[in-house]
Image (cartoon, coloured by chain):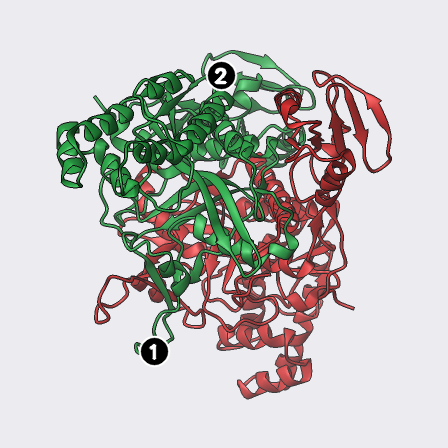
Chain colours: A red, B green
Amino acid sequence: MSKLSGFPEFLPRERVVEQQVLDHLRRTFELHGFANIETRAVEPLDVLLRKGEIDKEVYAVKRLAAGDAEPAELALHYDLTVPFARYVLENAGQLEFPFRRWQVQKVWRGERPQQGRFREFTQADIDIVARDVLPFHFDVEVARVMAEALAGLPIPTATLQISNRKVLEGFYLGLGVAEPATVMQVVDKLDKVPADKVRELLVEQGLAGDQADKVLALAEIVTTDTSFVARVEALGVEHELLAVGLSELSQVIEGASGVEGVIVTADLRIARGLDYYTGTVFETRLEGWEHLGSICSGGRYDELASDRRNSYPGVGISLGVSRLLVPLGLAASRSVPSAVLVAVDTEDSRAGSNAVAQQLRSRGIATEVAPKADKFGKQIQYAEKRGIPYVWFPPTSVKDIRSGDQVDAEPTTWAPPTEDLTPHILRTPSKEQNT
Amino acid sequence: MSKLSGFPEFLPRERVVEQQVLDHLRRTFELHGFANIETRAVEPLDVLLRKGEIDKEVYAVKRLAAGDAEPAELALHYDLTVPFARYVLENAGQLEFPFRRWQVQKVWRGERPQQGRFREFTQADIDIVARDVLPFHFDVEVARVMAEALAGLPIPTATLQISNRKVLEGFYLGLGVAEPATVMQVVDKLDKVPADKVRELLVEQGLAGDQADKVLALAEIVTTDTSFVARVEALGVEHELLAVGLSELSQVIEGASGVEGVIVTADLRIARGLDYYTGTVFETRLEGWEHLGSICSGGRYDELASDRRNSYPGVGISLGVSRLLVPLGLAASRSVPSAVLVAVDTEDSRAGSNAVAQQLRSRGIATEVAPKADKFGKQIQYAEKRGIPYVWFPPTSVKDIRSGDQVDAEPTTWAPPTEDLTPHILRTPSKEQNT
């Protein structure tokens, strides 16, 4: 780990894991037709501050050559949503809507470093944005795609927790609550504050005791299927917006369910504090790693961006790649891509070793050549230290250094078993592993 | 293109080209056993300034919440070499040497924007670094790997121009020149200054006329094989360092030659102004795009880094990905990964269309589902605008919308021809194309 606090860096064996995770995410997103973009790291400072995310500490960027009196005009982006909204507006004339995009980039926040919080970290976002109208089925699609993405990762079981603001707001309105947004903010504290304390806060907000009880009863509903609908209805509250929300949430739960390796729940405690969500909301927790908080969050925002002529509604989810991988502390079986090390007998025969390597590479087998015409024992040790499984002795002998098996082989035809072609992930216990 | 000058951003069709270029680079580097790392975007300001690269305008980074009086302590990296050197020192105990690494990241320079110069751009670097001693054959390897990387790119023919500081310095010393470094700096101007003017500058530096003539005669030598050796020897200058340099350069030329699609030259005009190179030096020019300057440069530096106990010699090359791709202005055949659009007959049958899509995806075929149960003509138009070649009409009919051919097909068995699985690169004429 880096000595600059909050700026994690991986060793090669750890970076292999991150690469494989990013490869899997890309493959999943692209199979679903999401296009990739990258946006510049900086945005005009006023664009970032206009969003009013005052809790996010912004890093200002300024040419060192500029004078002290000259104010900073640029800042590093703190998420991928604000830059994406700006990109959509700037390129609206050249994009086809609805526009599905995936984006994996680093973001920066000048926070006080603490466990699971970084000043530089990688996020993987998917969003679908339309011009003026975004049909509801895209909420289902985004949930489904992220469920598939999570299911293929080398991580503890993830639970995608889905809710819908319309359910909460409609329920509160049906209860006769005057300020549903305020109630939602209080309910959002249930993660950190005990239920009886939240009840007190609700009563302080002017709710009657039985209203507060129903608000809390709603928040207790968690189901892995659409049975949440009957449980909400059993609370006896009615409102048009509530009915819309229940229908929407049912569709998302049905559409995202059935992906092996990930749990999908309707979880009515999830409210997402952020103002801009208007319907579906997502959070995600990892079994045994709940202290990390939500590692993958998002939702529907009816106005991602707007210009004079159009509004751009969107729905998206953002996966915290660093937030996941840094604490999990996974490493790969080798620190190099090489499946084969070609030994060198004497420096005069290096060309022959290079030729063997070139033949293996031409058939897609990552290969390196020994740095020095050392004793073969030393060359095997070189491979061992890096986790390279095979050592080739030119011209035609190859040894699996794990088993010691050595066979005759031609560099034009031999190939390792598929599972040895690339490094695989070792599930090493991490120092920070939860008990 | 972005409206923030010097911060280029790609449209999805252009980004596909960049993705494919980066995929090819990664594949090439990994086949040769190079491990990937990423370093944080920022370095302590004093680390960046210590390198004395005063011509590179550094972007300082500071938390907005910090006071005006508080000086910036961090800055964005302006290349990948300084961070790599820092990473090597910081992790020396956990890395295996010699350490081959590839690294593709953005770098930032607060330059005045001009053609081909950016404030944010992507570099692709390979380096091999050792502890204390780095055998010369690694110079050959780095040249070879980058020649293979360049050969597979969708770009005009690249010429990898290789020289060796020892040839130049040895030749100048053999000529009796007192300050070879100064002469090298003057010769380095040959790109921008006419030869007779350079001759004048050499004479101003105290060289006799015939010394200056020989210096210029050496700089004129360019060969695609090792015949440069005889041409240098014909100039009648002898020096031990020159002999070493000629031998080294011959090995690099031989090792890097023979890669189809790229030209490799020994080019004795190449000196690289930067002080830290000590032997092999590389530059690269593109046919018809010489005004871009060198798009891929590097060399051997006997001290990439050092700590109290060890020095870390290295050899590496850096490819300017943005510098290449932004002016070339290439775009892909489609703006989305999708090979297939599944049509939707009525919203009630969307689930059936989703099922077809899911079957295609499970066999690696990127597929999206129409956003709206529109007239089929409109759905075909949707595909056309994005460059999606196939439209599937559930349950069992697929149309190549380019040819109009429509066939019966099962989503469990049908596949497009391999060339349609992923977007391909269109060589669009660019506005900035050289005449």
Q: Is residue A193 visible?
A: yes
Please tell me how crowded label 1 is: few (under 14), some (14-19), or many (20+) other residues with Cα within 10 Å.
few
Q: Chain of mark 1?
A: B
- Is A16 rendered above or below residue B235? below
Marks 2 and 1, how far apart at CA? 59 Å
N-term mark: 2 or 1: 1
Q: Is residue B368 visible?
A: no
Q: Secondary structure at mark 1?
A: loop
- Is A142 rendered above or below residue B379? below
Quick check: B388 left or right of A374? left
Q: Amino acid at mark 2?
A: Gly
Q: Amino acid at mark 1?
A: Gly
Quadrant housing the C terminus of chain B: top left
**Residue B67's disc number:** 1
Closest to the observer, A192 or A176: A192
Q: Secondary structure at mark 2?
A: loop
Instruction: Please tell me in which quadrant of the rendered image residue B187 appears.
Output: top left
| Residue A8 location (% of width, % of height) | 56, 60
Instruction: Please tell me in which quadrant of the rendered image residue B76 appears.
Output: bottom left
- Is B24 rendered above or below residue A123? above
Closest to the observer, A157 or A169: A157
Q: Which residue is mark 2?
A: B258
Please tell me how crowded label 2 is: few (under 14), some (14-19), or many (20+) other residues with Cα within 10 Å.
some
| Residue A45 location (% of width, % of height) | 31, 63
Quadrant housing the N terminus of chain B: top left
Quick check: B342 left or right of B201? right
